[in-house]
Amino acid sequence: MSTTTLDTPRDSQTTGRRDIVKPRRKGVVSGGVLTTVTWILALVFFAPVAWMVMTSFKQENVAASNPPAFFFEPTLDQYKAVISSDAGPYFLNSLIATGVSTLLVILLAIPASYALSIRPVKKTSDVLFFFISTKMLPIVAVIMPIYVISGQLRALDSIWTLVILYTAMNLPIAVWMMRSFFQEVPGEVLEAASMDGAGLIKTLRSVLIPMVTPGIAATALICVIFAWNEFFFALNLTAAKAATVPVFLMSQMTSEGLFLAQLSAASVLASLPVVLAGWLAQKQLVRGLSMGAVK
Amino acid sequence: MAIRDLSLSRRGFIGAGVGAMAAAGLSACSGQATAGGKTSLVVAIVSNPQMTDAISLMKDFRSKHPNIDVRFVSLPENEARAKITASVATQGGEFDVVMISNYETPMWAENGWITDLGPYMEQTEGYDAQDFIPTIREALTHNGSQYSVPFYGESSFVVYREDLFEKAGLQMPEQPTWDQIRGFAQQLHNPEQDFSGICLRGLAGWGEVMAPLDTVINTYGGRWFDEGWNATLNTPEVHDAVAGYVDLVRSYGQPGAATSGYGDCITRFSQGNAAMWYDATAMVSSIEDPKSSLVTGKTNYALAPVKETDSAGWLYTWALAIPETSKNKQAAWDFIAWMTNKDYLKLVGNSLGWERLPPGSRNSTYEIPEYAKVAKDYANPTLKAMGNATQDKSMVNPVPYTGLQFVGIPEFQDLGTRVAQQISAAIAGSQSVEDALRQSQDFAATVARTYQKEG
């Protein structure tokens, strides 16, 4: 659309009135097509989620019916079953693992990003590459050593093992994300702060962090999503005491018998906290993700 | 100024890290077995319906053993098996009770990973270990000692739609042959109505397509290895068995058979989209449950189809064992004894319904009048199938391994799945049975070399 409005005056000067309409109509048509395509894509992506929510209100045999049932008598049985199946500890564990690891990540990533953007240390790019290189090894390749080491340290089935691993898992991404937000802070602002006599901590606390809050919020939300949904470590390193929500979802499945409806209800409940967090942070998130911190 | 602040903050962050580590250490220490005078048990089980029932009945266990606190780790079969194997093999020690099958029990007993349960069974009054179905008890015994006790057991048989058979004027024999099954499937197959003559597993996996297919190979006179540990998947017997199975499922089986396993077949048969289904006897708990099945009351059961042998069913059991690493073996046994004794069966029947009884573990289960009533259609076929499920009765030639629908060696999980992938591809039509078996023979020969050297 913006292209059309920009082009129009120039077109009218060179080719006359009849052509003025043409590009605009073209713009409307292509805009309409684009809108339709966007809607279709959005619906395609949303359909599985909608189906999951729908399935969660079905009885098991209705959920398994073929052809699939679009009209049915909704029931809350599956939600009742999930809630009565002692899901509380799993949610609590997920909350601890997600909350503490995100907090640690943010606490560690702020100074790291500061050192890598505003006051670049020696070999900054090497350090950055080192950070991201830790993400290059697939987790499945390190699970055995991690499992054995955790076993030796008697740290299997401990929520703090997950906290440490999730912190390590999210830290590189957080440093990279926050660094780009920090880089957009104008140097003048920091100079002004320094001239007013603010030390490093004060600059960080009173000047820098308030300016990059949307960036920090976006980073934190990403960390929350990754940690909340993490499955592989949780499955392999926990048992009864420290199991998190994704493991709980897995336990709703069975190789004998029907489970789709109850699994869907459990999945809806498991998604709610993240959806809620995303919805609350929506404004900050969009600003943080799409435009950078301080534009 | 800046440097001083930086170093301060660094120290702070290091402090936070150390704090987290210390917290981890503390929690690891507090995670020991006894808390507040109670013994804490962690039980790893497979999340099948009968096990979920056991969890829901824990109130009864708690009232009998107020000092034992039981926590469950319940996962689907594949994940549970991977997790339990990793934990027990590396002495991870997370679990006090694990649910394993007759595939793992002899190997793990040989490795010294699990506890001999014989002494525990003897000292438990009224436990009656002799009541376990003999073939199952034998499969869980190593060097004369029983290392795990069955929670439920199964063989394989055919379920069929009696109403449709009558309508078509067909008569299912008590002991059908594969040729007869093929004939029935041909007559009842109706793809236009999305109705298939038979449902058979085709999903790649040693516990999926290979389970029914191995029983077909057995009854056709084939085997995985001969007594000198030579791979024998290239023999005419194995070829005929596999070609017959693949052709049957491709011609008269369910659509998309190459990706359908036990779960898919349950759905298909119980929703009334198939005339027959050859699979685990445990299927009855889903098929006979009116809440999840549309064909309840319209079905009947026949023994596993045969070719050259008198019987062909498999033998499988989910059993409970105690890893050697457990620090609470007596409490672990108290729990196992609760879940596998005769009283538990009555508890399930009275509180949840007699059709929900874990079947196939004890002979006495079939003597309970209430159960005999609900299970009148399938009790006899199940018992008969389990009684016949021995290598003597279901195989033509002797083999150097244990197991009917599996080869009792650690490599089989991998080997079986690789071969299953080849078979699954043949069912999908992307390669011929000959190519699939040629490749499978290579895989099997590689594994065989280890045993030839040892032998």
Image (cartoon, helix red, strand yellow):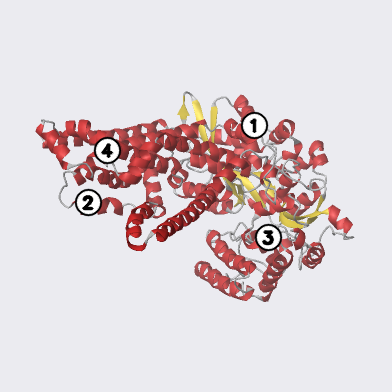
Are labels 1 and 4 on one chain? no
| Mark 4: amino acid | Val
In the picture, the disc for residue A289 is none
Of tags 3 and 4, which is closer to the observer?
4
- Cα distance in 3D space between marks 3 and 4: 61 Å
Number of numbered discs present?
A: 4
Q: Residue at the location (75% across, 62% down)?
A: B191
Q: Chain of mark 4?
A: A
Amino acid type, label 2: Val
The kind of secondary structure element at disc 1 is: loop
Provide the residue designation for mark 1: B57
**Chain to which the residue tagged by mark 3 belongs:** B
Secondary structure beneath dot 3 equals helix
User: Disc 4 or 2, which lies upstream in sequence?
Assistant: 2
In the rendered structure, the answer to whether residue B193 lies left or right of residue A133 reads right
Q: Residue at x 45, y 58 (%)?
A: A26
In this figure, which residue is indicated by the disc labeled 2?
A127
Between A91 and B204, the one nearer to me in the picture: A91
Q: Are marks 3 and 4 on the same chain?
A: no
The chain that hosts pointer 1 is: B
* Image x and y of residue B17, in percent: 28, 36
What residue would you read off at disc 4? A212
Q: Secondary structure at mark 4?
A: loop
Rounded to the nearest angstrom, the CA distance separating label 4 from label 2 is: 22 Å
- Is residue A220 visible in the rendered image? The answer is no
- Residue A181 lies in quadrant: top left
Do the residues at pointers 4 and 2 share their chain?
A: yes
Label of residue B212 in the image: 3
- Whichever of labels 3 and 1 marks the residue nearer the N terminus, that label is 1
Q: Would you call the spot at circle 2 few (<14 residues within 10 Å), some (14-19), or many (20 or more)?
A: few
